[in-house]
Image (spheres, rainbow, N blue to C red):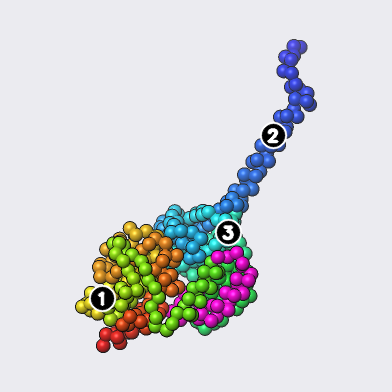
Amino acid sequence: MHTTPLPAGEGSGVGLIPFIYRMKQLYILILAVLTLASCGTDSRHFKLEGRLLNINQGEFYVYCPDGAMRGLDTIKVQAGRFTYTTECDAPKTLVVVFPNYTEQPVFAHPGKSVDIKGDASHLKELTVKGTKDNELMNKFREQIHSASPPEVLKAARQFAADHPESIVATYLVRRYFIDTPTPDFATAKRLLKDIAAKQPDNGYVDMLKSMVAGRESTPNGALPKLNARDINGSSVTTATLKKARTTVVLAWSTWNYTSVSMLRQLDQRAKASNGRIAVVGICLNPSIKQCRTALKSNDITTATIICDGRMVDGTAYNQMEMVGLPDNVLIENGRIKKRSLTMSNLMNEVDKIEK
């Protein structure tokens, strides 16, 4: 029987060694890729995936209230599923805005991924799984599900005190003690002190501390210094706020229905006031184009509109020491009369001044 000779090295252990070595390297590489895929993302990104019942297609918005991400992103929904990936080199808070303007906080960490599940018709019952902070937020939401407003505040205060090392505590302090029609700056200040000690590298905590200190230290009624430009390039200063007998400064955005409704109603009041009422709207949208489109579709033509694209980091928003969305400052004869009023209370106060 004739046997064809093997090329040099083949058929011997010596020739197989390099081949086996290369195969091991390839196996390790494949294993690493599969492991990375199972983790969801790499060490410099954060991934959010979700599936909701009772929704097929649509869009969600996502923004970052702590300023770690500029602008507003869009999440596309197909067949009830969605995926969103963002750069992430440090823990940060994302807020997902649903079509009915319900907001869901998601706490992002580098290299991590989370999964959102729930029913689009019961958005307050969503769960976010994948990291410790999001699991903590799930527990808090379950705790306050049937609680009264005073009980919710008590629970938020206790949770922040029990978990000062978590960025969830930072979110709750702003949500329940700063960004509210009746802020409790004393509680916020006390909680932020403990949070800052546990999160020394979190610049957002320092920003909130400065915000609270600014609101506490402003003399009663005194207008802060304002130096901005409106969307047409005209200067808007402290003097602008003193021209009319009544001026309302309102923080608004196109994705927050309540704030758009407030701006529309205030603009109508200003139109009918014969110059006695002025409105200055601070738009928190990252896009002036979006701002202009909303103004046109809502027939808002009298209000002075500021939009620098920097959202909550915007100059005017911070100079006016605003803390929420919507937020407002009611000015009478050049002095601050009230802050952070509900729509009904704001209109009642305007009526009192105009009588």
The magenta stretch spans residue 98: no
Label 3 SS: loop
Bounds of the magenta segment: 174-203
Q: Which comes sooner in the sequence, label 1 or label 2?
A: 2
Specify the quadrant that holds the C terminus: bottom left
Q: Residues within 10 Å of mark 1 (few under 14, many from 20)?
A: many
Q: Is residue 261 visible?
A: no
Q: Relative to 309, is 33 on the left or the right?
A: right
Q: What residue do we see at 43% from left, 56% from top?
A: 74
Task: Report which residue position mark 2 lands on.
Answer: 23
Identified at 41% across, 58% down, the residue is: 59
Q: Cα distance, mark 1 to mark 2?
A: 76 Å
On the image, the x and y values in percent for residue 52 come to 48, 60
Q: What residue lies at 43% left-to-right and 82% top-to-bottom?
A: 219
Q: Nearer the viewer, residue 259 or 7?
A: 259
Packing grade of label 3 (10 A; few <14, some 14-19, many >=20) is some
Comparing 307 with 125, the one in front is 307
Q: Position of residue 276 (x, y in %)?
A: 24, 79
Residue 195 belongs to the span the image colors magenta: yes
Sequence-wise, which precedes: disc 2 or disc 3?
2
Residue 270 disc label:
1
Q: At which x and y percent is residue 202?
A: 58, 65
In the picture provided, is 218 more to the left or to the right than 227?
right
- Kindly give the residue lying farthest to the top in the view shown: 2
User: Label 3 belongs to which residue?
Assistant: 90
Sequence order check: which comes first, mark 1 or mark 3? 3
Question: Which amino acid type corresponds to the residue marked 1 in the rendered image?
Answer: Ala
